[in-house]
Amino acid sequence: MNHNSKATDDNYPGRAQKPQQVQGKALSIMNEQYAEIIKEFPLFRGFTLHGAKLLLECGEVKEYSPGEVVLNEGDSPTFVLLVLTGEMQVFIERQGRDLVLTDASPGTILGELAVLCGMPRSASVRALEGSAVLQWSATDFRDLLLRDVFLSERIFRESLRTLIEKERSLIDSLSRAQAGRNPGG
């Protein structure tokens, strides 16, 4: 052994592993926290902590800054999002203006209709504030639905609810527009 060599932080064999271990531990703690959050969403009520962790393991947690666009209208549906924290805004751009359709709060699934129908995205989504989402690839999302009847039923019910709300909103808008053109009836 060379007594002249000094054990420094730079050549300490365990040093390279320490940041990874800390990062892994922090990631584990974050996943635990996100799993607890997921369990509380109405869509996932009745899920165990283990079930919520499985949802996390099938996807990837991503963070977005305020104003950052997360989904683009017209894009191919390659993934589905579950809003974990923060607030998102769903919008379309028409004639150079952004028309806000709705806001999406934690517990909202975004992009599932495009993935389920295999159609381009019908709207864009941006973060209104710092937000975290759980992103599943289209394939992983479909696999989740095939493996879990309980989850499938809830997702399909929520998707149908979204479609019905869009239809009602469209009917209301058309009614107001027609009433404006025919004020006397």
Image (cartoon, rainbow, N blue to C red):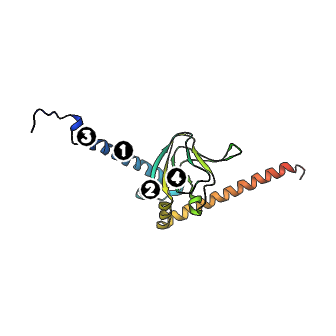
Q: Which residue is mark 4?
A: 82
Q: Is residue 19 above or below residue 44?
A: above
* CA separation in Å, label 1 and label 4: 21 Å
Q: Secondary structure under badge 3?
A: loop
Check if mark 1's residue and mark 4's residue have beta carbons within 8 Å.
Answer: no
Q: Which residue is mark 1?
A: 26
* CA separation in Å, label 2 and label 3: 33 Å
Q: Secondary structure under badge 1?
A: helix
Task: Give the percent coordinates (x, y) of residue 177.
Answer: 80, 50
Which amino acid lies under the numbered mark 2 shown in the image of this protein? Ala
Task: Give the percent coordinates (x, y) of residue 22.
Answer: 32, 43
Which amino acid lies under the numbered mark 4 shown in the image of this protein? Leu
Q: Which residue is mark 2?
A: 52
Closer mark to the observer between disc 2 and disc 3: 3
Q: Is residue 153 above or below residue 121?
A: below
First in sequence: mark 1 vs mark 3: 3
Check if mark 4's residue and mark 2's residue have beta carbons within 8 Å.
Answer: no
Task: Give the percent coordinates (x, y) of residue 136.
Answer: 48, 56
First in sequence: mark 1 vs mark 2: 1
- Relative placement, left or right, of 112 versus 97 is left
Q: Secondary structure under badge 2?
A: helix
Q: Which residue is mark 3?
A: 15
Q: Residues within 10 Å of mark 1 (few under 14, many from 20)?
A: few
* CA separation in Å, label 4 and label 2: 12 Å
Check if mark 4's residue and mark 3's residue have beta carbons within 8 Å.
Answer: no
First in sequence: mark 1 vs mark 4: 1
